[in-house]
Image (cartoon, grey):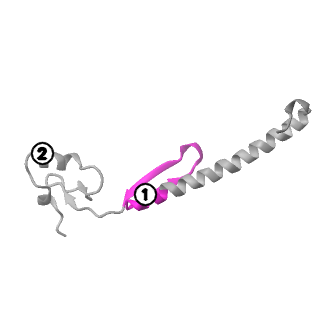
């Protein structure tokens, strides 16, 4: 390990600049690795992930690629693919004794 006590101010500044540059390289590499893992995990469950990288305001948009399988009879704009958590509207109907198969989309 380098003895920092023997370095003059210019050598220390140079060492700091070098370390910061290497840190950025490592952070970018880790960033790319994590994004690849997120996309692979999303793909494994049939979901597409779009990651907008715009500095501090990076956002993730998750869009389901699975087609709708169930439709809310009271509001046809509300559908469910059958993946993930059961939506409230379907849970309410099934809790009242209805069979979820009644709401299957037969297109």
Determine whether label 2 and label 1 are within 8 Å by CB.
no
The residue at the far bottom in this view is: 107
Q: Residue at x 51, y 56 (%)?
A: 37
Residue situated in front as seen by the camera: 95 or 71: 95
The C terminus lies in quadrant: bottom left
The residue at the far top in this view is: 5
Q: Residue at x 59, y 46 (%)?
A: 55
Q: To which residue does mark 2 refer? A: 95
- Where is residue 33? Give x, y as percent: 58, 55
Q: Which residues are magenta?
A: 39-64
Q: To which residue does mark 1 refer? A: 42
The residue at the far front in this view is: 1
Q: Please state if 69 lies on the left or on the right of 97 as rendered.
A: right
Residue situated in front as seen by the camera: 49 or 36: 36
| Element at label 1 | helix
Q: Residue at x 16, y 62 (%)?
A: 104
Q: Please state if 41 lies on the left or on the right of 16 as rendered.
A: left
- Where is residue 21? Give x, y as percent: 75, 46
- Where is residue 6? Give x, y as percent: 91, 32
Question: Can you say whether 105 is above or below 25 in the image?
Answer: below
Q: Residue at x 49, y 48 (%)?
A: 59
The dot on residue 53 is none
The N terminus lies in quadrant: top right
Q: Residues within 10 Å of mark 1 (few under 14, many from 20)?
A: some
Q: Please state if 53 lies on the left or on the right of 107 as rendered.
A: right
């Amino acid at each position: 390990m380098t003895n920092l006590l023997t370095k003059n101010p210019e050598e220390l500044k140079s060492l700091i600049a070098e370390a910061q540059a290497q840190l950025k390289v490592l952070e970018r590499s880790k960033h790319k690795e994590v994004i690849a893992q997120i996309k692979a995990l999303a793909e494994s469950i049939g979901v597409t992930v779009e990651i907008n990288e715009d500095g501090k305001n990076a956002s993730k948009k998750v869009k389901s690629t699975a087609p709708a399988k169930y439709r809310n009879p009271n509001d046809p704009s509300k559908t469910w693919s059958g993946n993930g958590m059961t939506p409230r509207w379907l849970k309410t109907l099934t809790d009242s004794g209805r069979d979820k198969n009644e709401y299957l989309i037969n297109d």
